[in-house]
Image (tube, rainbow, N blue to C red):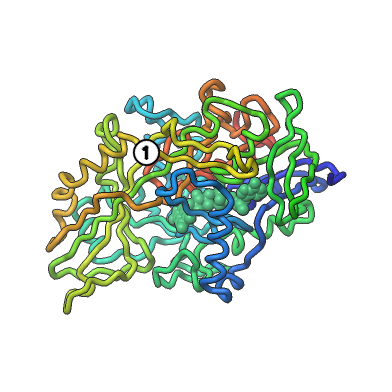
Amino acid sequence: MITEKYDVIVVGTGFASSFFLSRFLARAPAGARVLVLERGEKRPHRWQLEDGRSGRRLMQREARASFVNASPEKVWAFLLGHGGSSNCWFGNTPRMLPEDFRMRSLYGVGEDWPVGYEELEEYYCDVEEAMAIAGPSNDSPFPRSRPYPQPPHRLSDVDRLFKRAFPGAFFPLPSARPTVATSRRPVCCANGVCMLCPIDSKFTVENELFHVYEDPRVTLRYGATVQQVEVEGGRTATGVRFLEAEAERTVKGDMVVLGANAFFNPHILLRSGLSHPELGTGLVEQAAKIVRVDLDGVDNFQGSTIATGHGYMLYGGEHRRERAAALIETSNRPDLRNGRGKWRQVVLLRVVYEDLRQRENTVTVDPDDPRRPRVTFTGHSDYAQRGFDALPSELERLLAPLPVERILVPSQPVDTESHILGTTPMGNDPARSVVDRHLLHHQVRNLVVLGGSVFPTAAPANPTLTLSALAVRAADHVTGKAAA
Ligand SMILES: Cc1cc2nc3c(=O)[nH]c(=O)nc-3n(C[C@H](O)[C@H](O)[C@H](O)COP(=O)(O)OP(=O)(O)OC[C@H]3O[C@@H](n4cnc5c(N)ncnc54)[C@H](O)[C@@H]3O)c2cc1C
């Protein structure tokens, strides 16, 4: 037992916890006492580079060992340790569109979010500033109150053809890989190996938010795996139980904040006796198909980062009543074509489909080893499948601006989109959601749940900007600064 008592106990040090803490500490009094429990280690960027492949493999092994994959054909990707998956993410940072928050009202599918785009807009801006996002301020699909902090990346010639043909539906992709050096990070070098950026250019928790863990009000413990929130009378969180070097420990706190990701948040809540029909069900991930297009006479790869263009040609519209929308990323990673004189005449399009929560895709407590979540994934929804099925017939219109020589459409989606969502959904109705619009647990009002687990739907957009904005908003709320 750690005898001291804390004002706040935060679990995890990924995007969600770190953005929450950065705003919380900006608002909290000088004497606030915050404990952060992180199950992994601090593996600095320099260590990851020096240790090269073996270090990364060790991190991947640790992540795989942390849960029981009951559907081994489904791949899941994340890293544990300081900064969570900011150590391996790519840094693509679109916002969700206003209609993504209103799927039930507009299209009769999924759920409406209890928060609208307008309420989140200022928080999107704050997180974009903190990450120094490079994006198109004057030509953006998202209604914006502030410009992007950095100009967008340079498009490729293929992107320019798309842009000319679809001016209102094709844009430079917003990215946490800078176009202008910041005080801590150089300009992206466009080498296409973003999972471990060799020059520490993309945003990570370590390179831009580490200061929150150096704040004198914060005590950070590594190797502390939280197992359970202690809840008194089913209504009040009084602390957490965690494992440290195999020993079970307890610590007391006035508020508990879970930022452990969409596998571990529901696992911790289930072990805390907080059962709910929506808790741990509805695990969802977007699904992508990578279409390869061989070109006749147009070279690719003039862009200034790994993925340069964003196409919304298969996104908005009434078709979302019946089948999934998709967001298209154009790849600028130099995957050359095998053919003399045609090395650069190829483009890979990542077509990312939204999906809906499915009850049968679950995170539960493993009966043989209750310390680990058991993850079951039976497949994507029929809604996503109908989106995939429509793709071949949509390609003619989509690819009309390009001089196409050959198109290859895979039969299956990629094995993971690396976005784990939906296992503690947010909503206004306590019977149908686990947390409220401020990410407070509906019954335990001093328990906050952050991250992709709170997403009630999985829009095509990459989720991290949105989950970080929600975390900042939650911190404003608990410190009494946000609108109700
Ligand atoms: C290869 C890859 C590429 C990606 N690219 C993009 C991208 O381009 N754009 C995008 O938007 N998203 C991307 N993502 C997804 C993005 O990384 C996640 O959305 C994001 O990391 C989620 O943030 P989080 O803070 O909720 O969780 P995490 O980053 O998973 O952090 C969770 C933290 O909690 C800790 N933790 C877990 N369990 C416990 C416990 N029981 N006790 C204590 N600590 C615990 C972990 O060690 C970690 O520090 C990518 C992911 C991967 C794997």
Q: In the rendered structure, which amino acid carries the disc numbered 1?
A: Asp
Q: Is residue 148 in view from this perspective?
A: no
At 79% from the left and 56% from the top, the residue drawn is 216
Establish if 182 lies above or below 271: below
Q: Position of residue 331 (x, y in %)?
A: 32, 62
Quadrant (top left/top right/bottom left/bottom right) for the C terminus: top right
When asked about the image quadrant of residue 471, the answer is: top right
Horizontal side, residue 90 vs residue 342: left or right: right
Hey, which residue is sitting farthest bottom in the picture? 340
At 53% from the left and 34% from the top, the residue drawn is 280
Hey, which residue is sitting farthest right in the picture? 3
At 65% from the left and 24% from the top, the residue drawn is 443
Q: Which residue is mark 1?
A: 355
Q: Position of residue 407 (x, y in %)?
A: 17, 58
Q: Is residue 80 in view from this perspective?
A: yes
Establish if 197 lies above or below 6: below
Closer to the camera in the image, 376 or 48: 376
When asked about the image quadrant of residue 408, the answer is: bottom left
Horizontal side, residue 66 vs residue 108: left or right: right
Q: Position of residue 346 (x, y in %)?
A: 22, 66
